[in-house]
Image (cartoon, coloured by chain):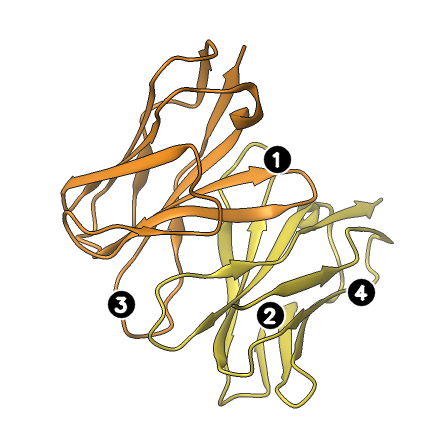
Amino acid sequence: GENVEQHPSTLSVQEGDSAVIKCTYSDSASNYFPWYKQELGKRPQLIIDIRSNVGEKKDQRIAVTLNKTAKHFSLHITETQPEDSAVYFCAATIQGAQKLVFGQGTRLTINP
Amino acid sequence: DVKVTQSSRYLVKRTGEKVFLECVQDMDHENMFWYRQDPGLGLRLIYFSYDVKMKEKGDIPEGYSVSREKKERFSLILESASTNQTSMYLCASKPDWNQGRPQHFGDGTRLSIL
């Protein structure tokens, strides 16, 4: 079955700097890759997703890149702000499959 | 906006008790999921359901069962609660069984088994 590895487990950056979180997946048939943000005490919420027919997707300060050959995808946050502090989860799924396989999560801290 | 509602935010139960966690979604989604969330382990799938009365095991189904009698409601049952089931439990729902669509999560139930 699919396995998703996420790194780093914790990340601390200065406000205004960029943050990058990386995930690798094992099943080459995976074709949908969402990213979730979970603030303390709140539910995970989708922040961006990408499908395998696209190499990069951007939404304001957030971007996701996908390398199908290497089977990895990354979340990039630019100009970080204190409200970006949260736990971020990557996930992967195979077309036709209902379930997502999640990475272990990255706790991102933005230092003022 | 999709609303996934879990019946309790916090729950404390005793070892050996039968525990019910309830989840309701209001968007007529076919698919519903139960996860547990533990530090350093991410979200692990316990069970999911793609239709009324249908269920499939996820990655960690041992010690759990589920019930889906109505499309909007998906219940997680701990048959005989044990201390290693102390965790955060998250419910999620998703439409479109055959396409890549995001899951929508509830606020979670933090369950403590004493």
Residue at image mark 1? A40
Look at discs 2 and 4 and give the one toward the viewer.
Answer: 4
Q: Residue A110 at what x, y percent from top left?
A: 79, 48
Q: Which residue is tagged 4?
A: A18
Locate residue B65, reporting x and y percent: 32, 36
Note the chain letter of the yellow one. A
Residue type of the residue flagged with mark 2: Gln
Nearest the eye: A77 or B19:
B19
Query: Alpha-carbon distance for marks 2 and 3?
Result: 29 Å
Q: CA distance from mark 4 to mark 3?
A: 36 Å
Which mark's residue is nearer the viewer, 1 or 4?
1
Residue at the image point whose x is 15% and y is 47% from the top: B53
Q: Is residue B106 left or right of residue A87?
A: left
Q: Nearer the viewer, mark 2 or mark 3?
A: 3
Q: Tell me whether circle 1 and circle 4 mark residues in contact (CB < 8 Å).
A: no
Which of the two discs, 2 and 1, labels the residue nearer the N terminus? 1
Q: Are marks 2 and 4 on the same chain?
A: yes
Q: SS at mark 1?
A: loop
Judging from the image, mark 3 belongs to the subunit labelled B
Marks 2 and 3 on same chain: no
Circle 2 is placed at which residue position? A60
Marks 2 and 4 in Cβ contact (< 8 Å): no
Residue topped by disc 3: B97
Q: Earlier in the sequence, mark 1 or mark 4?
A: 4
